[in-house]
Image: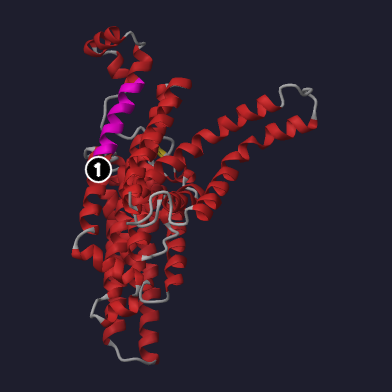
Amino acid sequence: MTQSDMKKSRAPLYFLAMALLISAVGLLQSWNSALSILNMGLISAIMALGVNLQWGYAGLFNVGVMGFVALGGLAVVLTSMPPVPAAWSAGGGRIIAALVVGVMIIAGAAVLWKRMPKGRTRGLVLTAVLILGFFLFRFLLDPAVAAIEAVDPAVSGYLGGLGLPVILAWPVGGILAAGAAWLVAKTALGLRSDYLAIATLGIAEIILAVMKNEDWLSRGVKNVNGLPRPVPNEIDLQNAQWFLDMMVRFGMDPTTGSSIFVKLLYALLFLAVIILIVTAMELALKSPWGRMMRAIRDNETAAEAMGKNVTGRHLQIFVLGAAIIGVAGAMMTTLDGQLTPTTYQPLRYTFLVWVMVIVGGSGNNWGAVLGGMLIWFLWIEVEPIGAWIVNVITSGMDDGSSFKAGLIERVAYMRYLTMGVILLVVLRFSPRGLLPEK
């Protein structure tokens, strides 16, 4: 058996092992827990696919994953929540006018920069335009924001969304993330590669700061609850006769059964999305476009010598990867049923996603899926497993023992330790990941 055949036979075994691990959680803990891990694992796998597209296909280092995930979550609010008529009446029109003016000022400054000759005059004119434009923008925006946020702030205080089906928010999340990626990459990709990492980190923090502080947009830290769902509510299922009859046939409690049924529906939706994305990425990878992207990644100088537009291709793939991450962010917020800006942390939505890509196998789409599922499983299960191990080790110790208390207190650090150990072990014994690039 050749090395290539061994790699091909390894992949099904890894995914079978993942299925067994999730099934073990269902049997030993609960099927609700198992399906929760499955659903978030699928979403994490989609995030890993987006990063893998950028890094594995083109070698672009994106450390702003958190920002693109957050934009996907914001898209769910802007797309699916019903509009707040009182807020729109109070200042909606003025908000739109301010945003239009802001875009026109930036566009005008860009035109002046290109058309005016270099020199002190151009600098003075641009400075004057930007300063005057800023004050005009704030003059229009600030009173509108104050009026909107004063509209029933305990439950509202924001404009709301378009009231469209929540499924439409998933591609909208991709579009928002792609737009932000285009803005940052259009500037940073023409510079040294490390500037892209700095720019993505900065844009992620800016996006999060806007979401936390601009209450008129997404209620800020007050959160948006009760987001629409693409699947039935558990309480509706518990009141539906067809569902109660089905629970009787299976011998299940309707309350537990409704939660499992809803999670299964989410899992089917997420599986459909991930199959669609992986299929498209595999077809692209095996096409002339995919071969060109890998050639650019491996040797940019040679690719440029062959007449390839390296910067343009990098921009293209960076935007596509960010769009996939945005879709995953919208899916996650839909699953949670609420938008909570304070929960977006770099450790979870940047570092952990990078661990998924590295462990799974950079440049291999199925490796990214495997890494996403495996690392998320461990992220959730390591702490209870660690608590069980510590309880077994300390079962014979006195309750007042400082050593026992110290071990129990440090169980929460098990997941961080485990992620570091796994990353080191994989990099030592399989530097290209569990499923290396073919």
Other-residue count near label 1 (Cα within 10 Å), few / some / many at <14 / 14–19 / ≥20: few
* In magenta segment, residue 269: yes
- In the rendered image, residue 138, in percent from the top left (x then y), is placed at 39, 63
379 displayed left or right of 16: right
Query: Where does label 1 land, which residue?
Result: 275
- In the rendered image, residue 118, in percent from the top left (x then y), is placed at 34, 91
Q: Quadrant of the C terminus?
A: bottom left
Q: Residue at x 38, y 50 (%)?
A: 435
Question: Camera-side residue: 5 or 414?
Answer: 5
- In the rendered image, residue 230, in percent from the top left (x then y), is placed at 25, 32
163 displayed left or right of 90: left
- In the rendered image, residue 380, in percent from the top left (x then y), is placed at 50, 35
Question: Camera-side residue: 108 or 257?
Answer: 257
Report the magenta stretch's main SS: helix
Question: Camera-side residue: 306 or 241?
Answer: 306
- SS class of the residue under badge 1? helix
Relative vertical location of residue 375 with respect to residue 104 in this rendering, above or below = above
Q: Is residue 74 visible?
A: no
Q: Which residues are magenta?
A: 259-273
Q: Residue at x 30, y 41 (%)?
A: 86
Q: Residue at x 25, y 14 (%)?
A: 243
Q: Quadrant of residue 51?
A: bottom left
* In magenta segment, residue 69: no
Relative vertical location of residue 65 with respect to residue 18 in this rendering, above or below = below
Q: Which residue is the extreme one toward the front?
A: 1
Relative vertical location of residue 53 with respect to residue 256 in this rendering, above or below = below
Q: Residue at x 47, y 67 (%)?
A: 198
Q: Amino acid at mark 1?
A: Ile
